[in-house]
Amino acid sequence: MAAPATQALRLARALRELRKSTWDDRTLTQAQLAKVLSREGRVATATLASWESTTNPKLPPPEKLRLYALFFATPRSVANNEPRIVAEEDLTPEERTAFNVLKTTLLELRAAVRLPGASADPTLVARYTWEFPTGPITIICPETPAKERSPLASKSDPNYTRLYRYADLDALIELYGHLRATNPQLEVFHRLPSEVKADDLSGHLVLLGGVGWNDVTRRFLKTLGHVPISQFSQDDVPAGEIFAASKESGRQTYRPVMETDADGSELLVEDVALLLRVPNPHNIDRTLTICNGVYSRGVLGAVRCLTDAVVRDSNEAYLATRFQGAFGILMRVPIVRGEALTPDLENASTRLYEWPA
């Protein structure tokens, strides 16, 4: 086994040293600290031990580092002779200062593990793609054309449900929940293109869906002239828009794969997805992320690429080692029994095109 990187050792040792600071004249055990940190999701003792390991350290999620900072930056509170975390809103001004300093230190140590030697720009690097140091975060979703909507999308229906106006609902629900869980202190909004105001476009922005039903996506793709990826409609691809990318050998198009079923109907067996992250052209201190597909299952695949617990860590590791800052990837999204499978970026056959090359 290769020796762990210096950055990973630094974080592991920092966590171990924090735990070994005295509590009630005793050293806090890993089991005790794991119980403390289980306030927002269970932490096993073995998991905490892996964070402190000097042979094969694992990377704690940022929300657990926040709890580390909250606990160790405040005087120990005891209930039934057991340590517990003081609520953040109950911190004194001195404790809040200590908490913010320790939290920043731990997150910077984590960032150095994620992207060793990379720029310190927190808007494009330093943490997972869906972690943001500041808010707000706004998701702009495509709007289902009136002729395609459920009757429940009509305000005249007694069971009117506003979300029936949204297209790509699978992708929205997946991403919205993940963003709220990953950024618990930040505001997360979702908007239809017709509802977008100027202020929505100046924060961290996430665009879902293709250029056909989301005109905000269409406008931004035209604005990003330095990105050699485009999307456009094609007569032989009904209800979807294909992708094209500029290569040294010329312009290449990327289409979904259809198969004919036994009854003669065509089935989608592979979609194409775009995952793009660049600085927001309306505020370069914030980010613009586009999750797009030829069809809706491509959009979902682009989202799940970095939310699916099974492969997101390996996919994030691929992005961290492959790119420094802005990136764009066109990828295959296999469809099995109508369900979109999450793309695995470590599989070379999944990646159709990468920018920058």
Image (cartoon, helix red, strand yellow):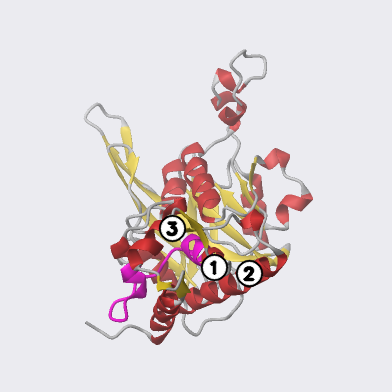
Q: Are marks 1 and 2 in contact (CB under 8 Å)?
A: yes
Q: Quadrant of residue 269?
A: top left
Q: Nearer the viewer, residue 194 or 247?
A: 194
Disc 1 is placed on an element classified as helix
Q: Which mark is residue 42?
A: none
Residue 224 point in image, percent of width and height: 64, 64
Q: Amino acid at mark 1?
A: Ala
Question: Counting residues from the N terminus, which is met first, the one under dot 3 or under dot 2?
Answer: 3
Q: Quadrant of residue 8?
A: bottom left
Residue 225 point in image, percent of width and height: 64, 66
Question: Counting residues from the N terminus, which is met first, the one under dot 1 or under dot 2?
Answer: 1
Q: Are marks 3 and 2 in contact (CB under 8 Å)?
A: no
Relative to 146, say whether 166 is above or below: below
Residue named by callout 1: 69
Q: Residues within 10 Å of mark 2 (few under 14, many from 20)?
A: some
Question: Counting residues from the N terminus, which is met first, the one under dot 1 or under dot 3?
Answer: 1
Q: Amino acid at mark 3?
A: Asn
- State which region is magenta: 48-69
The residue at 65%/54% (across/down) is 89
Residue named by callout 2: 100
Q: Nearer the viewer, residue 323 or 265?
A: 323
Q: Choose mark 1 or mark 3, whichever is in front.
A: 3
Q: Which mark is residue 81?
A: 3
The residue at 51%/68% (across/down) is 127
Q: Choose mark 3 or mark 2, whichever is in front.
A: 3
Residues at marks 1 and 3, CA–CA distance in whole angstroms: 21 Å
Residue 6 point in image, percent of width and height: 40, 87
Q: Residues within 10 Å of mark 3 (few under 14, many from 20)?
A: few
The residue at 57%/18% (across/down) is 151
Specify whether residue 60 is painted magenta.
yes
Residue 82 point in image, percent of width and height: 43, 58
